[in-house]
Image (cartoon, grey):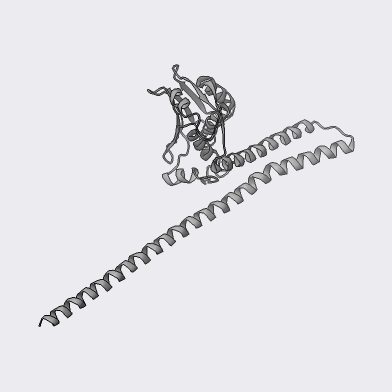
Amino acid sequence: MPWQRHSARSRRKSLLADYSANLGELMSRRQSEAALRSAKIEADMASRTKSEFLANMSHELRTPLNAIIGFSEFIQHIAASGKTSDKTVEYAEHISGAGRHLLNIITDILDISKIESGTFQLAREEYDLRELIDACTVLVDPRMREKHQMLEVKADPALPRMRIDVRRIKQVLINLLSNAHKFTAEGGRIVLVATRTPDGGATIAVADTGIGMTKEQIDYAMTPFGQVQSSYSRGHEGTGLGLPIAAALTKLHGGEFHIHSEPGRGTTVFFTLPPVAADRAGSHNRGERQ
C-alpha cells in the first residue's frame, strides 16, 4: 500500500542518514587519532632532540671549561711558588684555544637563535668571491695537510664580485671545508668548485671522499643541534649547528643550499648565490642591513 511504501522509504532514508552520520563520526575520530599520533611523534622527536642537545652541549661546554680552569690553576700555582716552568707558555696557549672554542660555541647558539627569531641581519658589501675562497682555503689547508688530505680548488676566472655579508659567507664555506676535513679519512681527497651561473650568480660546491650519509642522516644533520652519530664521527667535537646555520645564512642571501651524499661514497654540499642585479633588487627585505 502507498503508506507502507512511504514508511519503508522513510526508514531507508533514516538508516542511510544514520550510516552517513556514523561514517562521518568514524572518519573524524580517525583523523583526530592520526593528528594525535603525528603530534606525539613530533613531540617525541623534539624531546629527543632537546635531550641530545643538552647532553652534547654539556660535554661541549665542560671540555673547554675544564681546560681553562685546570691550566689557569696550574699557572696560578707556579706564580704563587715563585718558580718558572717551560710549560707555562704551553698551558697559556691551551687556555687561549679552549676560550676560543667556547666562544665559538656560544656564538653559534646566538646565531641560530637570531636566525630562528627573524632578527638576524646581514652586513653586505661588494666583494670578490675568488679572494674569499683563497682566504678560506688558506685557513683549512694546514689541517688537511696534517691528515695528508689533498685539497683541490677549481675557481672559475669569471666569478663575479657580489654584494654579500663577507664574514657570513666565509663562515659558510669554512664550515663546509671543515666538515669535509673532519669526516674524510687520512689521505682522502676534497675538491672545491666555484662557477659563475648563466644568470650572473655563483655556485660553490665542496665534495669529499669521506664517510657519507644516508637520506635520513642528512635530514637529521640539517636539524638544529642534530648530530649524525657513527663509529667514525662520534669522536669529533661539534654542536650540530654548523650545517643549519650555513643553510640559513645562504637563504638569507637569497640563495639555495643542497647536500648530496651516500654512505661510503662521500658527500657533496653546494650553495648558490643570486646574481648581483637580483641581490640589489631585494636588498630592502627584512633581515638585511645596508
Name which residue lies at 80% across and 41% down: 73
Residue 14 visible within the image = yes
Asked whether residue 192 is in view, the answer is no
**Residue 104 position in % (x across, y down):** 63, 37
Residue 100 horizontal/vertical position (percent): 67, 35
Task: Name the quarter where the C terminus is drawn.
Answer: top right
| Side of 88 relative to 14 (left or right) | right
Query: From the image, which quarter does the N terminus lie in?
Result: bottom left
The residue shown at (71%, 43%) is 65
48 vs 234, nearest the viewer: 48
Nearest to the observer: residue 274 or residue 284: 284
The vertical placement of 203 against 32, above or below, is above
The outermost residue toward the top is 157
Q: Nearer the viewer, residue 63 or 221?
A: 221
Q: Which residue is drawn at 69% across and 37% down?
A: 98
Q: Where is residue 254 in the image (x, y as percent from the top left)?
A: 46, 32
Residue nearer the viewer, 207 or 119: 119
